[in-house]
Image (cartoon, rainbow, N blue to C red):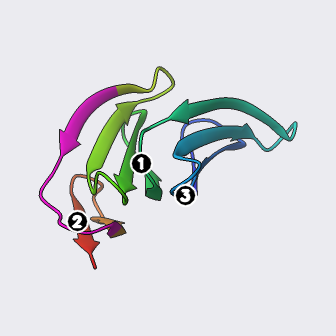
Amino acid sequence: MAWSPHQHGLLVSGGGTADRTIKVRNTLTGATTNSYDVGSQVCNLMFSRSVNELVSTHGYSLNEINIWRYPEMQRLATLTGHSYRVLYLAMSPDGTTIVTGAG
């Protein structure tokens, strides 16, 4: 799950192997406003602090990292190279770099 630093009350959550979706929720109204099938298990979600972009990391079956332009959910980049689920995601204090880890 990740809170948007750009829109008050906006929370995104990721689904497991069977669900494979990123859901967008308005916590002020309780409504799920969108659901996007991303093709694999969602392990982590994190918004950029400086631009309205979202990073998602994935497990079965793609084991990849995606960068999305929000709210369009246009995939800007796909990073591959992990052999296992991308379980760990952290951002540098200045918000310019991410680091990921897999099992």
* Mark 3: amino acid: Gly
33 and 93: which is toward the camera: 33
Q: Quadrant of residue 93?
A: bottom left
- Please determine whether, in this image, residue 27 is positioned above or below residue 17: above
Helix, strand or loop for disc 3:
loop
**To which residue does mark 3 refer?**
16
Helix, strand or loop for disc 1:
loop
Q: Quadrant of residue 66?
A: top left
Which is more N-terminal, label 2 or label 1?
A: 1
- Determine crowd level at label 1: few under 14, some 14-19, many 20+ residues with C-alpha closer than 10 A: many
Q: CA distance from mark 1 to mark 3?
A: 8 Å
- Determine crowd level at label 2: few under 14, some 14-19, many 20+ residues with C-alpha closer than 10 A: few
Q: Is residue 81 magenta?
A: yes
Mark 1 vs mark 2: in front: 1
**To which residue does mark 2 refer?**
99
Helix, strand or loop for disc 2:
strand
